[in-house]
């Protein structure tokens, strides 16, 4: 059993900060469970464009409000606590928080924690053997 809190990863190399967001990567590929879990904070008034070409991501909003826009269709959806959006087709999207948004993100395949968004908002596919494998 693994028990870990967001406080456990704060200030470590699993606590990634950018101008628009902060991602606390709680469960990573090294755990060998087939997915990763992050708590992400998106800062109010920002605009972030993402495209997870190599990952499927589910996002559960726990706090705050904003929108997510599907770049392929132009359709915009409201985000508020209790909303989930699933990027099941590697959807290019733009997130616009009106207030600070906190969300829980699940990635498959799992991220290693070393990924950095490239100029297209894409995480490269980095694989890692589970600890103890």
Image: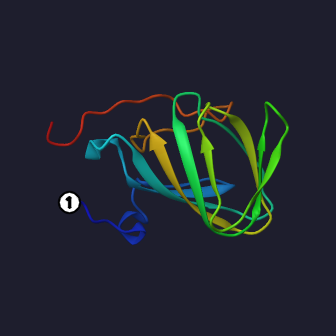
Q: How many marks?
A: 1
* 127 relative to 3 in the view: left or right: right
Q: Residues within 10 Å of mark 1 (few under 14, many from 20)?
A: few
Q: Quadrant of residue 21?
A: bottom right
* 60 relative to 19 in the view: left or right: left
Residue 102 coordinates in the image, percent (x, y): 61, 65
Q: Secondary structure at mark 1?
A: loop
At x 60%, y 44%, the residue is 86
Q: Is residue 37 above or below residue 132?
A: below
At x 36%, y 30%, the residue is 127
* 119 relative to 27 in the view: left or right: right
Determine which residue is flagged by label 1. 1
Q: Quadrant of residue 8?
A: bottom left
Residue 20 coordinates in the image, percent (x, y): 69, 55
- Structure colour scheme: rainbow
* 63 relative to 13 in the view: left or right: right
Q: Nearer the viewer, residue 96 or 9?
A: 96
On-image quarter of the C terminus: top left
The residue lying furthest to the left in this view is 132
Q: Quadrant of residue 42?
A: bottom right
Q: Nearer the viewer, residue 120 or 17?
A: 120
Residue 1 coordinates in the image, percent (x, y): 20, 60
Residue 88 coordinates in the image, percent (x, y): 59, 36
The residue lying furthest to the right in this view is 74
At x 83%, y 42%, the residue is 75
């Amino acid at each position: 059993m693994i028990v870990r809190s967001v406080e456990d990863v704060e200030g470590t190399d699993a606590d990634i900060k950018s101008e628009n967001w902060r991602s606390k990567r709680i469960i990573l590929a090294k755990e060998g469970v087939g997915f990763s879990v992050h708590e992400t904070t998106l800062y109010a008034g920002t605009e972030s464009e993402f495209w997870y070409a190599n990952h499927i991501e589910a996002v559960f909003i726990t706090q705050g409000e904003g929108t997510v826009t599907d770049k392929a269709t132009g359709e915009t959806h409201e985000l508020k606590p209790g909303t989930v959006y699933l990027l099941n087709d590697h959807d290019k999207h733009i997130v616009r928080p009106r207030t600070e948004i906190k969300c829980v993100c699940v990635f498959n395949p799992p991220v290693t924690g070393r990924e950095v968004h490239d100029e297209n908002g894409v995480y490269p596919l980095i694989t890692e053997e589970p600890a103890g494998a």
